Image (cartoon, rainbow, N blue to C red):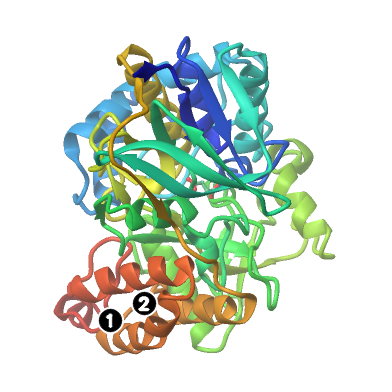
Amino acid sequence: MRARAPIIVVGSGVAGLVTALAAAPAPVRLLCRRHDGDGTASALAQGGIAAALQAPDHPAAHAADTLAAGAHHNDAAMVRWLCAQAPAAIAWLERQGVAFDRDGDGRLQLGREGGHGAARIVHAGGDASGAALVRALHRRVQQAGHVQWHGGVDVDALLLRDGVVRGVRVCDARGQRHEMQAAAVVLATGGIGALFARTSNPPGAEGSGLALGLAAGAPARDLEFVQFHPTALDVPGGHCLPLVTEALRGAGARLRDAAGRPLMTGLHPQGDLAPRDVVSRRVWQARRDGGRVWLDAGDVRGDWTVRFPTVLAACLARGIDPRRDAIPVTAVAHFHMGGLAVDADGRTGLPGLHAVGEVACNGVHGANRLASNSLLEGVLCGRRLGALLAAADLQTVSRGRSNWVARGNALSPTPLAELRALLWQAAGPERSAADLERAIRSCAPWSADGWQAAVAHRLLDAALARRASLGSHYRVDSALARLAS
Ligand code: SIN
């Protein structure tokens, strides 16, 4: 018997919202933990979207910067496609109602961030770009007749029928479980930053979708590549910390050590705007050596309430006026380049299961993502996957050999906190075989108890296996690292 069932999209960040919109007219059920669509990493994104919009900038230059940041570990064809499509993504977002910041003559304002050879970051609401995108896309989804929003649920199992993913099981706020059939399942569940002791991600970014895909046997790729952002607000004892956007350094802010000396002088030709791994490592080392690190934004011109309202509010809430006072900053886990291995259209290695956005790895970011390429990826890959699903002849097969694959229990708070500290110490901006082996031994007993530990274990194994430093993965014990020090 053949019946029609919806496409199930799990996650309400930019990648999930765009996939759901682009799948029209196919029926979509969008499942997410929150009712209001908040709580995603997309909504916290500050910088904006990179796009080479006008000469002398060119998509080829954007692609060259993306490859250089990614240590040429990227899928070059994906990079060329992403950068060539970026101007069209900006135009499409404007048609969805995103109001990007413009100057007095109506031209798009372009910011500059680390690793970019040109000012090419389009932004909205100053440093509130992600929130502006999520708001506009959420509104479109609410208006779209083909999308049914289903908030307040956690997807904790996949249904396989004759080896093809054909449904999900959700757990609601009362702990009750419900099964849903699907024509196809899309994971758009975001990253893993919250598995580290310090992160710019929201608390829910623990790799729930990655864990589900791994449990079902979907192949993963590049799990060892985690990007650390050099500047989050250094709140002692904090876990999920407010980001202090790189755009501030693009506007003239400078990192300083505890003695007030410029932190990046002599380390890289791009100084404070060097690729993120370089700056993060320097911040990490300075803090490890006992000092605090400060961002001096006193020379940043313009009205902070317009240009940097998010950073301003986060600082003021903690008694720091960044227009006057240096901002205490720390490196944090920010973005996972690795994830479920997908092809250019978002297909995982498991039939019926797709992944998009940070949970997926199509190779576009290589070993280290270039600033402001993540919302871009979410928009473009979401549109591509949605269009593929809209065009496919998707049917639900209700007969066949079925089995459920569950993600398993979540870790309880104490081992979870210990796991975060372990990952931060062993798989942070600096790694070594000895630390990774120790962490794997400590983590092993928890892997059977909680899916967060199973994800961490896979990451640690991948980091141990890659013995040479590359991009964000920095092995202090590799020959190259020894030569550089
Ligand atoms: C930032 O605003 O510094 C972060 C932007 C990004 O992650 O690309």
* Residue depicted at 59% across the width and 50% down the height: 245
The amino acid type, in three-letter code, at marker 2 is: Glu
| Residue 216 as seen in the image, left or right of residue 467 | right
Would you call the spot at circle 1 few (<14 residues within 10 Å), some (14-19), or many (20 or more)? some
The one nearer the camera, 174 or 8, is 174
| Residue 55 as seen in the image, left or right of residue 170 | left
Q: Is residue 102 visible?
A: no
Queried on whether the Cβ of the residue with tag 2 lies below 8 angstroms from ligand 1, the answer reads: no
Question: Measured along the vertical axis of the image, is residue 225 above or below residue 366?
Answer: below
The mark that comes first in sequence, 1 or 2, is 2
Queried on whether the Cβ of the residue with tag 1 lies below 8 angstroms from ligand 1, the answer reads: no
Q: Residue 314: horizontal and vertical position, in percent? A: 76, 55
Which residue does the numbered mark 1 point to in the structure image?
Answer: 476
* Residue depicted at 47% across the width and 81% down the height: 422
The one nearer the camera, 445 or 280, is 445
Question: Measured along the vertical axis of the image, is residue 39 above or below residue 108?
Answer: below
Which residue does the numbered mark 2 point to in the structure image?
Answer: 430
Question: Measured along the vertical axis of the image, is residue 342 above or below residue 451?
Answer: above
Callouts 1 and 2 close, C-beta under 8 Å: yes
